[in-house]
Amino acid sequence: MLRLDGYVRVSRVGGREGEGYISPAVQREAVEGYAAELRGEIIAWHDDQDFSGGNIERPGFQAALQRLRAGETDGIIVMRIDRFARSVADGATIVREIIDAGQIFASVHERIDPRTPEGKYMLTSFLANAELFLDQAKASWWTAKSRAIARGAHIGPTPVGYLKVEPRPTKDTHISPADSAAIGGPTSPGVLVPSPIYGDAITELFVRAASGRHGDSALANWMTERAPRAGGAQWQSSEIRRWLSSRVYLGEVRYGELVNADAHEPLTDLATWERCQREPGRRRRAASPFLLSGLVRCAHCRYAMAGFNYGGARHDTPVYRCSRGRTRGCGEPPVIVASRLDALVRDLVLERLRGLRLEAADAGIDIDAIDRELAEAEAELNTFATDLQARRLLGEAGWQAGLQVRVVDRDAKQAQRDEVYARGQLAAVAHHVEDLDHDGLRDLLGGMIRHVFVRRRARGADVAERALVIWSDDPRVIDVPGPHRSGRFEPVRW
């Protein structure tokens, strides 16, 4: 008796039944019946839910192939060929591999045997039809989304700060075209218009975030007071960071590679939005009552030091302590009073900020002039890129060379502007650093400091001798433990 595997695939997206929906139970019953006709039995099942046939990286599909290649089964049976694959190249290659190994590939619906020339032809034809159907479905879907983006419709949930125009509103976050026209907004369904409740609050939120004086937690608290959530619950810092990074508040809508940069009224401008963005790859530090939590490390083992409220001789003094200690592999675990280390680092940061203020004053940089130069470089690049006559006169090679020169010039002016803005922002922060709350100061330190190393010394030793601050712009490569890096590290010496 043949030992056969059964394969079942169901396409469903978001709980909606997809094309040619055939339930898993129906597919299994049909596969078992056909296995009996072939004088075999199903010894293993492989089930893929919510997977497209155009994707061969399906867990059940790959598990079935592994069993076939390992010789653990004599073949595989599917309900229909399009349950197995929707690509001629992928499907034919895999079926050929199965047949060449002397195994069986069978389909209940088509009832073909690809081991014969006729069966091979029929299999190729069915796969081609399945691939054509899939391509047509993708094309129709893409066309619909392209048209929606072109007319400015927002695809997805309504962002906080906006209302969405809908012909038949069913939720409080949607308004009808008539209501939209009454408040002076667009009338096309799906287009966003500013919310009279949350729109101004989002605009002010971006301004506060761009100042650099407030952390995400403080901004969440402010938003809760300024524009409370409909249900009364607290806004979360994770929501604030998601809003600040979303380009929808610049008036954009996008879907994959489709972008409409002028789809609706923006709630902030590009310069403010850019000042709210974090450096790529920078991890958000969790809220902590300790100012240097996440920054301070043991100089001996390089592992993070944690904050404890029960340090000192009387167990009532907040301290930073090496998280490993002698019992976990650190030979010289340091302990330092939190208030003393915080004060030292704070003073060093203030001194550095004062230096930046002096640099900005001495340089006499004209930010408006730098903005004008960048705008002129952008305009020159765009004009040259669309000048067909210049392309014909210069030839392809000459035109490409001229285009590259203008790209380099634009990028250089962009880098100069970004550097000036970053320094200018830090210089501005220096004026208000005394007004920063705890979370705001933690965010400031997290942007300026990479690590604070602490070494062990005799009781009473000066804090300045025990601590080493590594600034974010320090070019040195300093290896430290992380989520996927552990083990022994050499002590940091100074």
Image (tube, helix red, strand yellow):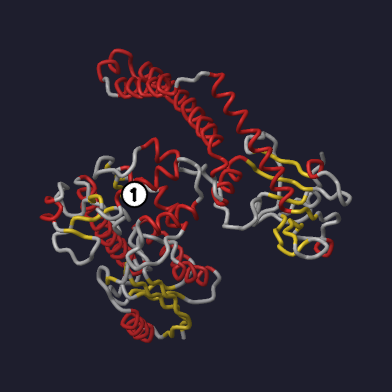
Identify residue for label 1: 256
Pick out the residue farthest to the right. 458
* Residue drawn at the location 63% of the way across and 36% of the way down: 350
* Residue drawn at the location 34% of the way across and 46% of the way down: 203
- Residue 191 percent location from the top left of the image: 21, 51
- Residue 48 percent location from the top left of the image: 40, 71
The type of residue carrying mark 1 is: Gly
Q: Is residue 9 left or right of residue 487?
A: left
Q: Nearer the viewer, residue 149 or 115?
A: 149
* Residue drawn at the location 72% of the way across and 53% of the way down: 338
- Residue 441 percent location from the top left of the image: 58, 46
Above/below status of 63 relative to 220: below
* Quarter of the rendering containing residue 174: bottom left
* Tag 1 secondary structure: loop
Q: Is residue 469 left or right of residue 69?
A: right
Above/below status of 117 relative to 379: below
